[in-house]
Amino acid sequence: MDLENRIGRYVKSSVVGGESYNAYIPKPLPPDPPLKLAELYSLLDKANTAIGRLDGMSMVLPDASLFLYMYVRKEAVLSSQIEGTQSSLSDLLLFENSEVPGVPMDDVTEVSCYVSAMSYGIERMKEFPLSLRLIREIHERLMNNSRGGNKQPGEFRSSQNWLGGSRPGNAKFVPPPPEILMECLGEFEKFLHDETIKLPVLIKAALAHVQFETIHPFLDGNGRLGRLLITFILCHEGILKEPLLYLSLFFKANRQTYYDLLQSVRETGNWEEWIEFFLNGVIETSNQATQTAQEIIALFKRDREFIETSGKSAAAILTIHTIMQRNPIANTKTIREKTGLSQPTVIRSFTTLEELGIVKEVTGKERHKIFVYGEYLNLLNRGVEAIKI
């Protein structure tokens, strides 16, 4: 098979000062010659089975929204870490509880905007198709922070960007120049909507991710939005009922291979090698998420039984335990506001939860205490920087 026909073209451009550089224009999707999927069907079946099992967890979880609430935050941290932020999951949860995180505020605000962009996109897709307009709206939410405010939030770029190097002339990769950008994006949107293209949804998501990263349509935020796009496509196409699959941990753990394969598609036209990597990521990530969900269910059930058989007045303690399933880092003020319980009742309940080994006070202070549902947070923290307070 002649893969050269799949390779895009380069156009010569120049910047102020006269230095010339070559910008890459990808071929429209789907690849031509068509993908050779025969050797990938076995892997595709395993990926579909794994993602189906994960999607089924949303039906058996006592509170699917609870798992989704925390899993979305984990993904926001991981995807932002790939871009260089230092924020941990613990920092984000402290920030959301009006506590001071242990990293620069800009880092945790950036992660918080990712959560907002993700939630907005999922809700918007219930009434609006996945399109360039929606991608711009999501980008505006994503970049709604001090770092992104000057990077044209919600607007496709009108200037040249590049990856690696100090300028386009010495960059590792230069995406399409601004005058060709909308042509590339038009073809990309056509691919998203073209029902005559009969490809498995996971393959479609794999192709779309690479194409989006290659076009690099925004001045900043392309990596994070490109990773979100995978989940949006799977939800939009009905493969997932809830947005439970995120590949950032897999991409982070295999970062160099990930970047090498993106560039290999551009230089060699070998989409199959990238798709194999992508499907392995879906399998690994789905299995990890399913296992984590099962362990969380077991943990909540075990701790609830501890409380019910503790001999203590259980009603208030169970109420706080339920709140901490959504807020594994909390202070007495947060709990009072969410439950309506009195301060003495909250303090007594936390004392019991500490005695049972379910929560731990982590500041050592007499006032402004912060309690952590440690075992739960540790399950969520797999692959993410450990708690630091």
Image (cartoon, rainbow, N blue to C red):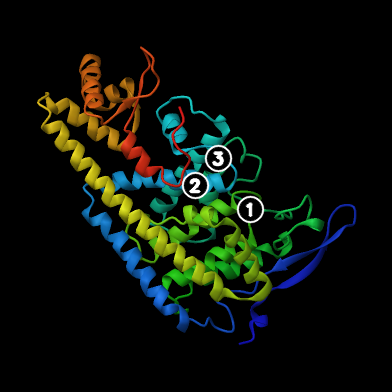
Within 10 Å of the Cα at label 3, are there few (<14), some (14-19), or many (20+) other Cα atoms?
many
Q: Which residue lies furthest to the bottom in this view?
A: 1
- On the image, numbered disc 2 is attached to which residue? 78
Disc 2 crowd, CA 10 A, few/some/many (<14, 14-19, 20+):
many
Per the image, label 2 sits on a secondary structure element best described as: helix
Q: Which amino acid does label 3 sit on?
A: Asn
The location of residue 287, given as percent across then percent down, is 35, 59
Which residue lies at the image location 60% right of the left edge and 76% below the top edge? 270
Of the residues under marks 1 and 2, which one precedes in the sequence? 2
- Can residue 77 be seen here? The reply is yes
> Which comes sooner in the sequence, label 3 or label 2?
2
CA separation in Å, label 3 and label 1: 14 Å
Report the side of 274 relative to 170 (left or right).
Answer: left
Above-or-below relation of 3 to 81: below
Q: How far apart are marks 3 and 2 (CA)?
A: 19 Å
Q: Is residue 129 visible from the viewing direction of this image?
A: no
